[in-house]
Amino acid sequence: MCGIIGYVGQKNSVPFIIDGLKKLEYRGYDSAGISILQENGTLSTVRAVGKVAELEKAALLSSPKGCTGIGHTRWATHGKPSEENSHPHTDCSGEIVVVHNGIIENYLVLRAKLESLGHRFQSETDTEVIAHLIEENLKHIRTGKQEERLLKAVQKTNKDIAGAFAYGVLWARTPGVLIGVKNQSPLVVGLGQNENFLASDVPAFLQHTNKVLFLEEGEIVILRPGKVTVLDKMGQERKAKSIKISWDRQTAQKGGYAHFMLKEIYDQPQAIEDTLRTARADFGKILGLDTAALRGLQNIHIIACGTAYHAGLVGKYYIEQFAGIPVSVDLASEYKYRTVPHKTKTLAIAISQSGETADTIGAVKKAKELGFRTLAICNVLGSSLTRICDSTFFTHCGPEISVASTKAFTSQMTAMYALAISLGLANGNLSKAAFDKLYRELMRLSKAMSETVKMEYTVRHLTRKIYKAERFIFLGRHANFPIALEGALKLKEVSYRSAEGFAAGEIKHGPISIIDKGTPVFMLMPQGSLFEKMLSACQECRARGAFVVAVTTPGGEEQIKQVVDKVILVPSVSEFLQPILNIVPLQFLAYWIAKRLGCDIDQPRNLAKSVTVE
Ligand code: F6R
């Protein structure tokens, strides 16, 4: 977790860094800090517990100024959130400052060694060893320009430390020079006019430049105001090509909505439209498999975490229905540690919005060791996951800033559907005519989503009645069962209410005992083959005093109204696409309950957007 930002240029770096940190707060927000290299050659460091706004207040008081600086927003892993544990961390001399994201696994051994050499530590963090190691290594590199010495010391430090990390370092003796290191944690470079940026993610500097340089694992980057040098893991200069990011600056901002979560719910028609642009492409090419290999696929393993896992569960229904290939879906953190029988002709699909989730990356590494072909379904260009997978299908949602995932989820399901019908066509499970029909339906999904998001008012109104409930239940069947799980997760995340999702057929096997008078129960029950069964579940819950809300499609409202307290109508699409729309009222529900309860919607307590630690 954690967000890093660095600036080298000709203007005062402080506003760039503070602004960048605000854009990175989704990566963690329990404390923040900046170090600015001032004109008199001294480093001024300001740190504060809490959000970046606290840091901003503190920085206003001490008003540091300088054209080179680094900043950090923290999500604690080693050491509690406190000012001492906030980054930047410094060496004994106070001349070297470091901001870091990731974990230094051997920090305890290194710390003991450095302490025995006389280094004094001020924090409980693993990060601080980096600053002291650079200081120690510099002592042994006596010749060369200061800049060369610093680079050598960083290279030596990288050999000493183990783990997944990205860090930025400034040395008071090398003004106008910022060094970045990337090793299995995200780090990107923004190229400006006589100014350059180092950051954990693109939105941190997108307001200033959309020219981005993605670093490979093990690389070091040296930033100066007019020059950026990338060294590969062998220490050789690499001519890195920049990419122009097409996300417009507004996309990365709230665009007039009160919260990113709300904006991102409304972004969904566009996100689906943009994702489907890729879906029109040839999946054989995306997967890097010829027709014979596509036909020969015998198993699919889906691995993901949280919301992405729920998209994977929906994907299982799609692939088994349309391609007839057996699918297993695993939480990435479980897949990594269970025995996975080795079978040939297996495709492992990793779903991840950020592409930086450590559990998912770990599971993909295992799939690769087992010899499986790997496909990422991912939203972030240049992310770690897309680099380790054999191929990637990008969901083009633009940046998802709210910690609670919404538009990434519906885009991931859309991608899974496109993949499933394409596999079905390729392996002969679907006729061309059947494929064409499914494809046409898919291409109309974005329009149906535009209709669906209009229901905010209905849901908002409903929440007035139920927002104080202690516990919420979500029930669904078939591909709507994962939607029930996702509805519960969304509500838990942003409102801190207790919420559970179940397969509707399961409640009578135990969970029904938690329903009592007034418990809100949301039934995902579109018209279709399982509608009658859902009606029975409504009656079972109503008989126990539940406040039953049916999320359904037009057609059977009159029948439903007799057994539920409230009906929410979602536009009707084909049976397998319906779950992609059905989640929308539950997203609004979570948003409005959290809002009424006064919760911090975009940055819920204890959470961070990218979980880059196991
Ligand atoms: C839920 C949420 C998390 C993520 C999970 C995986 O709203 O955001 O459950 O879905 O941490 O993250 P990615 O998709 O980035 O791998």
Image (spheres, rainbow, N blue to C red):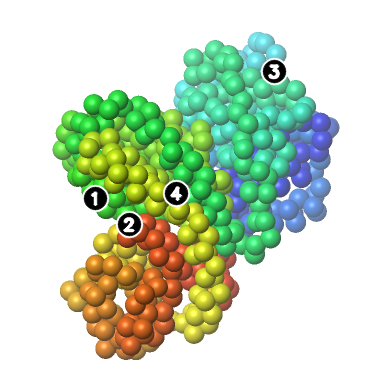
Q: Which residue in the rendered view is the most extreme toward the top?
A: 143
Q: Which of the marked residues, 4 or 1, is nearer the chain's N terminus? A: 1
User: Label 3: few (<14), some or many (≥20) within 10 Å?
Assistant: some
What's the amino acid at mark 4?
Met
The reply to whether residue 349 is visible in this rendering is no
Mark nearest the camera among 3 and 1 is 1
Mark nearest the camera among 4 and 2 is 4
Mark 3–mark 4 CB contact (< 8 Å):
no
Pointer 1 residue: 321
Mark 1–mark 2 CB contact (< 8 Å):
yes
Secondary element type, mark 4: helix
Mark 3 and mark 1: Cα distance apart in space:
63 Å
Q: Which of the marked residues, 3 or 2, is nearer the chain's N terminus? A: 3
Say whether residue 229 is left or right of residue 456.
right
Q: Position of residue 613 (x, y in %)?
A: 43, 44
The image quarter containing residue 471 is bottom left
Secondary element type, mark 1: helix
The reply to whether residue 517 is visible in this rendering is yes
What's the amino acid at mark 3?
Gln
Q: Residue at x 44, y 49 (%)?
A: 443
Q: Which of the marked residues, 4 or 2, is nearer the chain's N terminus? A: 4
Pointer 2 residue: 576
Mark 1 near ligand 1 (CB under 8 Å)?
no
Pointer 4 residue: 443
Residue 146's tag is 3
What's the amino acid at mark 2?
Phe
Q: Which of the marked residues, 1 or 2, is nearer the chain's N terminus? A: 1
